[in-house]
Image (tube, grey):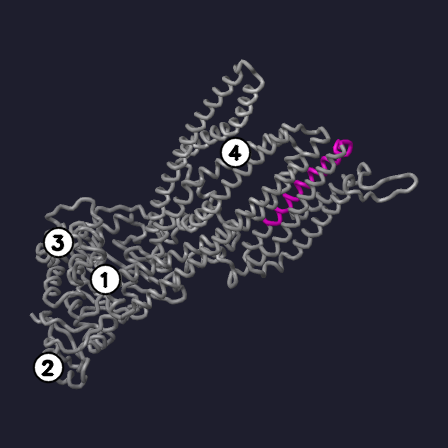
Amino acid sequence: MVIVIWTVVDLTFNTVASFRYQTAFNVNVTSPALDTDVTSTTLDLWVMSLVRACVMMAWIGSLSRFRQLTEMKQQIVTFPILIIYLLMWMYNCVKLLLFAEHEELLSERCRQAQLGWTCCACIVTSVLLIKSRDHNMTSGWIKRYPGSTQEEMPLLRGEKIKEEKSEAKGEPPRSAVCQLVKISLPDMPFILCGLLFLLGSVACEILIPCYIGKVIDGLVLDPSQQAFRAAITRLAVVAACLSFCTWARTWMFSMYVARVTARIRVGLFSSVMTQDLDFFDHHETGELVARVLSDVAVMGDSLSPNLDLCLKGLFCGVGVMMLMVQTSWQLSVLSVICLPAFAVSSHIYGVVMKATSKSSQEIMARMGEQAEENFANIRTVRSFAMEARETQLFHRAVTRLYGNGKIEAWTHSTFQPLTLLILSFLQVCALLYGGHLVQRHILSGGDLVTFVMFLNMVNTCVQIINSVFGLLTKGIGASQVVLQYLRRKPSHTATGTLVKSYLRGEVEFKDVSFSYPSRPHQTVLNKLSFRVKSGEVVALVGPSGGGKSTCVSLLQNFYRPHSGHVLLDGIPVEHYDHRCLHAKMSLVGQEPALFSRSIKDNIAYGLDACPDADIISAAKQANAHDFICAMSNGYETLAGEKGLQMSGGQKQRLAIDRALVRQPAVLLLDEATSALDSQSESKVQEALNSSREGRTVLIIAHRLSTVEKADRVVVIHRGRVVEQGSPSELLTLGGMFTSLARHQLLRTDSSAILNDPAAMMADKRDGNGDDDDQTKMPRISTDSGINFSLSSSSEPTLETVC
């Protein structure tokens, strides 16, 4: 509607202006004829308005059809139209200079209004065209895949579907520059001071040529040289002020960039750390590391030295242009005619540099991801003799990066000579037209020389901007991905505020249904319900993929259930404060995670203050004190990256130590003893059994030795509770738990085992048989205190030996 109204107003104004004072037609009594003299008629301006109206009407009529095109194709369609509008604008400027040759024509206000209106109309129509195109691309109809440009594609692999939908709903993409300005608000004193000194340095640079002229005039025209001395003194003062302002603005802008880069890096790390776990399921670790370190570094290095130079060239160019208009408005209009050429070339240059910069950042992230994986798993790579293959894959990524580098080099080497060519052509035209004005006594020879000097200053400013524009564009391209992560809101945040100093540890799953965001159509838990009393030890068993580990994740408030509630002491876990919840709950996972810090810091991880006595006591409980003391620096020994300095069993015992030292109300064990040998496992099991008093223990178990002393076993299959009860009770039922036990214990001839269970136990004590911790429940340990026997129903049972 806005485009239609504007088109009608544009056409109506030009029609009225063209015929109001009979300027478009020669009205002669003897022979009325159409005025086609380009130096006097405004009919061509009316024709241009008619062309604009036809083009915009055709564009509006084709919007629904263009919605079926990709974003790149829509840009290709609109680019020639924008070129036509720029050519109209250039023609209007030439028309103004032609009218200037006849003062009586230019003196008519109707002509002046029509010329000014046409210039504005070309600009406004171009803006409306671009806005309508952008709105059309975000209206939800546009095909974004396949064939979209890189800028349309999600900036990272696996970008979340809902983010694309939010863009498709018409939410305008935030400009990286606007976002940087918003982030820069705390550094506004540095920015304002830098701009102040920048204006001072620009003013000094503009004054220096003026005082040089006065120095020459004083030396030649004043024999007493008093004017010369005054001018040279002022010139020295201005030069000194220029030096100080240049130092001050450089320091201010450098401090601003350093501060904002540090703030963005910390904010980005904090934003990534607070994302939901589904975010980490979609993004590789190496990629995120590259974003936090590499992309922010590229952004800072690109902005730090170049922002100062670019702003200096911009302000200096604007100041000089104002003096150019004051010197000769005709020559200024001639100079403005070349602006569309600059605009088109700069736009193409910026699009190419942004695209290649973002592509290069993506490739760098992939390279960092591959390098991190290869270096961290060098033993696996070497054991499979994959060094050459991995090097080949890395070489392919470097080749793609080299291709982007060639595109950037070709674009940069083409853009700068093209800019110099346009400026040189502009100087030649200024001298030719300026000479014409001098001959007509409209301009003096001195003003012409002054204007050419100003034009050279503008040339210098443009060259400065060109030299840093590519780097600035590269920095902004890198910042787009960084800022996207910085402003990303997690779908699930810990917003609870409830803080309790004491928890009984009662856990209840009440009709819980859940599916992971990455697999929304695959139900993991289906109306699952069970309850764990305070101080009770409950083991969750069942086939892999049944939802056992998901229960632990929901209990820790890592995800939100789609329906139902996960309760802790009768209160939904999402109502608890994040730190309070995890201070009362500890997890020991299958793969213990240690940090590259001392063993002491790893054990006390997450505790603000932990006495050494508590650390040692917990280490003794976890059977870790002896091997820690045997190390060179004891508890101050560095664990190494991901705990590579220790064996799997040692890392597992440290993880148990870290859980016990917190004195949790709820202890979560996800195959916590899977990496221990039988002797260490027995000791740790005894420590865990002795420390269970006063706390609730939830065990995810595959081994019968792990669940033998559980108060209750909950069997989960396909997201539902199929059985629950004590181990001995479930074995007498002959259900799934019995099947899992038989499948684990009876790996050989089932008939022989059923006939001679004692032989089977002896065979297990000798270490025969295979274990599979992923799909089956492993063998009973030799010192478990459990005896295998036959019930009256000829089904195997587990009975406690008193």
User: Mark 1–mark 3 contact, CB under 8 Å?
Assistant: no
Mark closest to the chain's N terminus, 2 or 4: 4
User: In 3D space, how far apart are the residues under numbered discs 1 and 2 (Cα atoms)?
Assistant: 34 Å
Residue, far left? 802
Q: Which residue is mark 3?
A: 618
Q: Name the amino acid, label 1.
A: Glu
The image quarter containing residue 423 is: top right
User: Mark 1–mark 2 contact, CB under 8 Å?
Assistant: no
The kind of secondary structure element at disc 3 is: helix
Left or right: 179, with 116 as reference point: left
Question: Magenta includes 125?
Answer: yes
- Between residues 214 and 557, which one lies in front from this camera angle? 214
User: In 3D space, how far apart are the residues under numbered discs 3 and 4 (Cα atoms)?
Assistant: 69 Å
Instruction: Give the magenta range.
Output: 103-131
Mark closest to the chain's N terminus, 1 or 2: 1
The kind of secondary structure element at disc 1 is: loop
The image quarter containing residue 102 is: top right
> Which label was assigned to residue 759?
2
Q: Which residue is mark 4?
A: 316
Q: Which residue is mark 1?
A: 591
- Vertical arrangement, residue 435 with respect to residue 785, above or below: above
User: Mark 3–mark 4 contact, CB under 8 Å?
Assistant: no
Question: Magenta includes 29?
Answer: no
Q: Name the amino acid, label 2.
A: Ala
Which callout, 2 or 4, points to the residue nearer the camera? 4
Mark closest to the chain's N terminus, 2 or 3: 3
- Between residues 726 and 656, which one lies in front from this camera angle? 656
User: Mark 1–mark 4 contact, CB under 8 Å?
Assistant: no
